[in-house]
Image (tube, coloured by chain):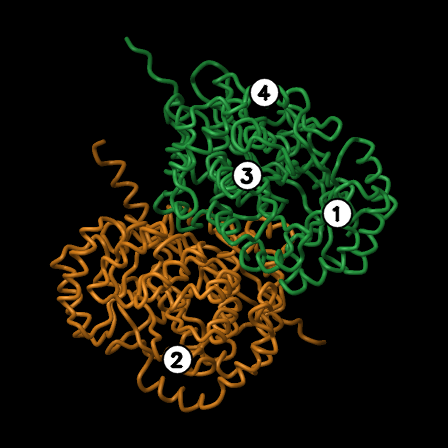
Chain colours: A green, B orange
Amino acid sequence: MPTAPARVTGFTTHDIRFPTSEESTGSDAMNPDPDYSAAYLVLSTDAGDGAEGHGFAFTIGRGNDVQVAAIEALRDHVLGRPVEELCADPGTLARALADDSQLRWLGPEKGVMHMAVGAVLNAVWDLAAKRAGKPLWKLLADADPAWLVSQVDFRHLTDALTPARALELLRRGRHGSAEREAALRERGYPAYTTSPGWLGHSDARLTRLARQAVADGFGQIKLKVGADPADDVRRCRVARAAVGPDIRLALDANQRWDVAEAIVRTRELAEFDPYWIEEPTSPDDVLGHAAIRAAVAPVRVATGEHAHNRVVFKQLLKAGAIDVLQLDAVRVGGVNENLAILLLAAEFDVPVCPHAGGVGLCELVRHLSMFDYVALSGTTRDRTIEYVDHLHEHFLDPAVVRDGHYTVPTAPGFSAAMVPESIARHTYPHGAYWAARTAADEEAPA
Amino acid sequence: MPTAPARVTGFTTHDIRFPTSEESTGSDAMNPDPDYSAAYLVLSTDAGDGAEGHGFAFTIGRGNDVQVAAIEALRDHVLGRPVEELCADPGTLARALADDSQLRWLGPEKGVMHMAVGAVLNAVWDLAAKRAGKPLWKLLADADPAWLVSQVDFRHLTDALTPARALELLRRGRHGSAEREAALRERGYPAYTTSPGWLGHSDARLTRLARQAVADGFGQIKLKVGADPADDVRRCRVARAAVGPDIRLALDANQRWDVAEAIVRTRELAEFDPYWIEEPTSPDDVLGHAAIRAAVAPVRVATGEHAHNRVVFKQLLKAGAIDVLQLDAVRVGGVNENLAILLLAAEFDVPVCPHAGGVGLCELVRHLSMFDYVALSGTTRDRTIEYVDHLHEHFLDPAVVRDGHYTVPTAPGFSAAMVPESIARHTYPHGAYWAARTAADEEAPA
């Protein structure tokens, strides 16, 4: 008798929250008190190989339950599906999820529902890479270019990028890939650090952390701006004095400004030679970013962590609105949509510097940038991945940065799996951490 | 002793679904089988006047539970708040909801979370209008222009519209408002009908319903296109033959095309003299709509039912991407954001023809268009509200169309309240309708 094909037998979600608001870690002009959280998914199978697929959406606290509910809404698309078929072609699932004829209304392709699609697809890619015995970046870098093209949904993209052109780019990306892979394993991939620059830090802490960053080998640091203008000037002065003239100083306004204000404020800070201004205004405002870019050069304009899908990136590139594209591993529809975004960036020759930090974003995005270097853009010039040094201890295959570079992940998978004890302890509201805090709150005098 | 101020004491959500997929009602190229649904909210108070605030997000079936969860996530912003303060200034609540420092990450200002914000704000406006004893359109039309300006969040808009300019527009809109109000009460507001044109209809049914629409006094009908090109040509021919040369024939592609395809397909249908092509491509693609508009004139380009916030509308207008702006009462952040959108449309002199149909959208949008006519744009020229003749029986103050015009609602409130029996019967999954269907499904042979 033929054996039945292995199927996805488990689709388990977790509402995981870390109490980061108790420190000022993660504070910026728009997000003063985040509790970094993950709406987390585990796919299990009856393949008997023990491999699970892990994926998540990142949120900053309240509403993580809504995000979990959105992932749950996709359950029937995955549970019971043949594992082999799913892992051999996540692109078909990607289209099915984006096109669910009823769920689509809740986006389309944006917000909570689209992040849920990303979490599910990333879990499938994690499972696929584990079953292939490769880290995700390597699975992608080794894959047949035509198969990679088949993983991308080109709908609403073809005025900027066709499947035929994508195939050309991927074939071109193969030239010299073995040498680049060797170089990557030797040196790693450039990183920059945001840890010195949170708004909540004192000037003394900013100075200390900025100097430490330089000593640690980082060639770029990032500073949050966008609250009080006089504070911004003072903090930029402090940061520039701390790092000296040769370190790139990136600024991040976290969407706080209108277009005209963004131009005025960025020009005010130009004396400190900022490398880029990030999220100067609404993440939806393609034309606004283009106007700002034209007015603040040579300061570069960077955005993308809140760009909700490939169509927004297409427009940012077509409009000449950005100098730096900051993809996010879990904001858009997973690896498949990030392949589209990397291809668009390659086509327009705009460097990709992924957004990271949060929960597990460093762990994930390094795979995307390393694939891009080895097998697509072929360069790390002006490319660097954000690094924030917190919460890595909760991951089984944590991001490691040495001498200002991300080291190459070698474990099979997408590095999304969290430490089981961390999941249990930080599950909201009944995990040990939150249960204890609730009890303490109830005992405290009003 | 002073009496305590009345407070919001109830925040009750309902998952309501209608089995519209059992007919072909609502079928289009992107949405073949919608079950028109509402994530529904009732606010109650201890004011003792019996007035409740009703609001909802419209969805098309699966995922309505996710939408309910998103509304629930906003509970603490409203429950316990003083009613008088809330109703006197919904704008402050609007900003608090959009700026919730943790929930904001789930958008920002888009998708499930933003629709939840809209549902809550619309419920507050419904309550405010009931307490004022006026239908919403009249409350808005009578309001002090400076107060209306205070209800709008101008963040990320000021490169297109400032508060000062908005005040000018609203003051200008007051000239002759009494005459227009009288005319409105006499004639109503122009409507067009989508009921003939669903993709699932046979040619015979299309012909019959199109002729009926003309007989009923409609000056415009709408036809769904975007699936099979040959079918589109045939159905346009059938529809044009049915209505004759003098009725406006609008086409709606429901996002199915890429930019180049949209241009080709629209030109193919030009011989049938379409009035507008609606949602020719991705609703996120401002630049794509601009390119299509430049290529298909004199056919007009219309979009907006999936435009997720005021920043998207700002760009559609700044880029010259649309001839017709189709706001939606429940996609964006409620009445406050729709005030911003109506002001933008007035500033750019682009006619607003709201999206309606669904569940309760006709009931709501008529208030916005009637306010616009009486006290902002001052005209109904080239303006018409979509009408779809289903599900109105579930509303206490249903939309009524006579001789191709929406009659003026006169009951206090925003007309959002559903018939209590309809709520009970269609609550998913335990209301009488769904419980019976589940039982029938379980009894049916596999």
Which residue is the site of mark 3? A330
On the image, the x and y values in percent for residue B271 come to 20, 63
Please report the residue visible at 54 percent of the width from the left and 85 percent of the height from the top. Answer: B171
Q: Is residue A83 above or below residue A388?
A: above
Q: CA distance from mark 4 to mark 2?
A: 75 Å
Q: Are marks 1 and 3 in contact (CB under 8 Å)?
A: no
Q: CA distance from mark 2 to mark 1?
A: 55 Å
Which residue is the site of mark 2? B410
Q: Secondary structure at mark 3?
A: loop
Which one is in front in this view, the residue at disc 4 or the one at disc 1? 4
Q: Amino acid at mark 1?
A: Leu
Which residue is the site of mark 1? A223
Which one is in front in this view, the residue at disc 3 or the one at disc 2? 3
The quarter holding residue B26 reads bottom left
On the image, the x and y values in percent for residue B300 come to 33, 67
Q: Are marks 4 and 1 in contact (CB under 8 Å)?
A: no
* Disc marking residue B16: none
Residues behind callouts 1 and 3 on a single chain: yes
Disc on the earlier residue, 3 or 4: 4
Which residue is the site of mark 4? A179
